Image: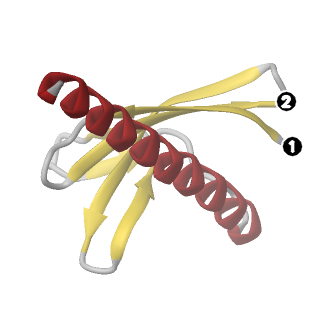
Amino acid sequence: MKITEIRIHLMGEERLKAFASVTFDDCFVVRNMKLVAGAKGVFLCMPSRKMQDGSHKDIVHPITQEFRQYMEEHVLKAYEEEVKKNSSSENEKKEDEVK
């Protein structure tokens, strides 16, 4: 199974940095993955549902550690690229305002 598309939606909040939608093999998409800032950097959270006892349970998740690493690596790379693209767009806007 290969990732064929990743869409990142930046949030700009203190802990919630972005949402990600990941398409696999051009035929299956998982939406509402969260990129969250933690003590060791940004990490990927699977979509989850709040249970009656207040805990959260993942709705979807990778079965193997290898696939989790593959997915996290690609989603985090896409997130970093989106942040970089967004910050250069913001810088261009500021430069235009100064002119």
Q: Name, please, the residue furthest toward the top.
A: 27
> At label 1, which amino acid type do we have?
Met
Residue 46 shows up from this direction: no
Choose between 48 and 17: the one closer to the eye: 17
Residue 15 lies left or right of residue 27; in this view the side is left
- Estimate the x, y position of residue 28 in percent, counting from the top left: 73, 23
Whether 98 is drawn above or below 38: the answer is: above
Residue 95 is left or right of residue 67, and the answer is left
Residue position marked by numbered label 2 in the rendering: 25
Closer to the camera in the image, 62 or 19: 19
The image quarter in which residue 50 lies? top left
Q: Is residue 7 visible?
A: yes
Helix, strand or loop for disc 1: loop
Q: Residue at horizontal 45%, vertical 39%?
A: 85
Labels 2 and 1: the sequence-earlier one: 1
Q: Is residue 1 left or right of residue 98?
A: right
Residue 69: numbered disc = none
Q: Residue at x 24, y 42 (%)?
A: 51
Q: Quadrant of the C terminus?
A: top left
Q: CA distance from mark 2 to mark 1?
A: 6 Å
Q: As drawn, is 49 to the left or to the right of 96? A: right
Residue 92, given in percent of the width and then of the height, sits at 32, 32
Amino acid type assigned to the residue bearing label 2 in the image? Asp
State the residue position of label 1.
Answer: 1
